[in-house]
Image (cartoon, rainbow, N blue to C red):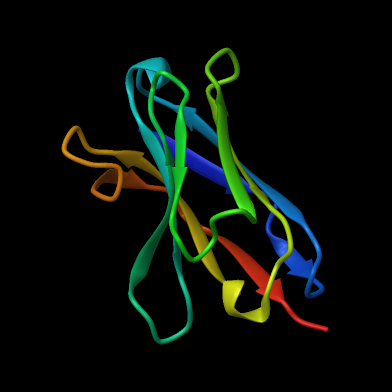
Amino acid sequence: VQLVESGGGLAQPGGSLRLSCAASGFTFASYDMSWARQAPGKGLEWVAGVWKEGDGLTAPSVKGRFAISRDNAKNTVYLQMNSLKPEDTAVYYCARASSVALDKYDYLGQGTQVTVSS
């Protein structure tokens, strides 16, 4: 299983970024997928998840600002992040969700840094 994130970087408060995660090594369309993040000095926080059928769910902390989507033809999951805040600064991880819940993970990618600062 490989999960490779891209799209992180520096954004200004109020700005936008789109993260991508290219998945390989498993039947992507058969699995739910998630994004999680880890801010400096904090634990891993679930951010958003998308079921294999395509419906997405976001955490209350990002609801209305972030959106998750997937393209099964491209084996890719996306996280569109709008209205970014400094508290969104974290390493963002793509995850293959377990069969139990979207916030339980079988595999994590290597992560991509997102920094929100003026």
Answer left or right for 19 relative to 108.
right
In x, y percent, where is residue 86?
Answer: 66, 80
In x, y percent, where is residue 106?
Answer: 24, 42
Examine the rendering and report whether any part of residue 77 can be seen: no
Residue at screen point 30% across, 39% down: 97
Residue at screen point 54% across, 60% down: 62
Quadrant including the N terminus: top left
Residue at screen point 60% across, 44% down: 67
78 shown above or below 64: above
31 shown above or below 65: above
Q: Find residue 70 and report its image quarter.
A: top right
Examine the rendering and report whether any part of residue 69 can be seen: yes
In x, y percent, where is residue 55?
Answer: 46, 28
Answer left or right for 13 relative to 57.
right
Task: Report the front residue among 60 and 77.
Answer: 60
In x, y percent, where is residue 105?
Answer: 26, 46
Quadrant including the C terminus: bottom right
Task: Report the front residue among 69 and 93.
Answer: 69
Outermost top residue: 73
Q: Find residue 88 and report its image quarter.
A: bottom right
